[in-house]
Image: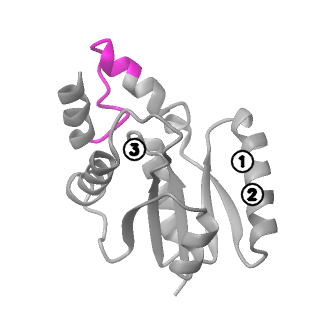
Amino acid sequence: MKTAVYPGTFDPITYGHIDVIKKSLKIFDKLIVATTDNSDKEYFFSIDERIDIINNSLFKDLKFNRKKIKVISFSNLTIELCKKYNATAIIRGLRAVSDFEYEFQLAGMNKKLNTNIETMFLMSDVENQIISSKFVKEIANLGGDINRFVTKFTVKMLKNKY
């Protein structure tokens, strides 16, 4: 069984992230969606809220198969998660060329840390490539319609925060 880890902040998860998850599941039997809990960063949603949003978005709103996806939090190296879950790959989403330089460097460092783990870059579908969690939060804060960018549960959670 081939397993991959898809790490990110998912603050909150968007349809861009979900496209990457869908594409990953075409390649891998199991996907670990890992939301980071880095004490150096400030998050809009707490780690527990992000886990709740991801679970509700994937399994209730979109009816993904729970046997194929595990949602976790982590605060260690992604390479360590791969080892823990016997994952052979790290999935990284790319939206624009500007994402590539950072992601390329990150992939190189991960390869230096563990030569057995590959990094795969996946792009969301064209209509979702412009979506970012930052923009979604800004639109929600200003009272705009975010239904095209996130699931129903995420909309509800954002409305509760604002």
Q: Secondary structure at mark 3?
A: loop
Q: Amino acid at mark 1?
A: Glu
Specify whether 14 is left or right of 145. Answer: right
Secondary element under disc 1, as helix, strand or loop, is helix
- In the current view of this chain or complex, which residue is farthest to the top? 142
Whether residues under marks 1 and 2 lie with C-beta atoms below 8 angstroms apart, the answer is yes
- Which residues make up the magenta segment? 138-151
* Residue 90, quarter of picture: bottom right
In reply to whether residue 139 is colored magenta, the answer given is yes
Amino acid type, mark 3: Ile
Q: Look at the image and name its color scheme.
A: one colour
In the rendered structure, find residue 145 and report the number of the disc placed on it: none
Residue at 33% from the left image edge and 47% from the top image edge: 50
Q: Closer to the camera, 62 or 36?
A: 36
Q: Which residue is mark 3?
A: 13
Write down the residue under mark 1. Answer: 103
* Marks 1 and 3, how far apart at CA: 19 Å
Helix or strand or loop: what does disc 2 sit on? helix
Name the one closer to the observer, 27 or 90: 90
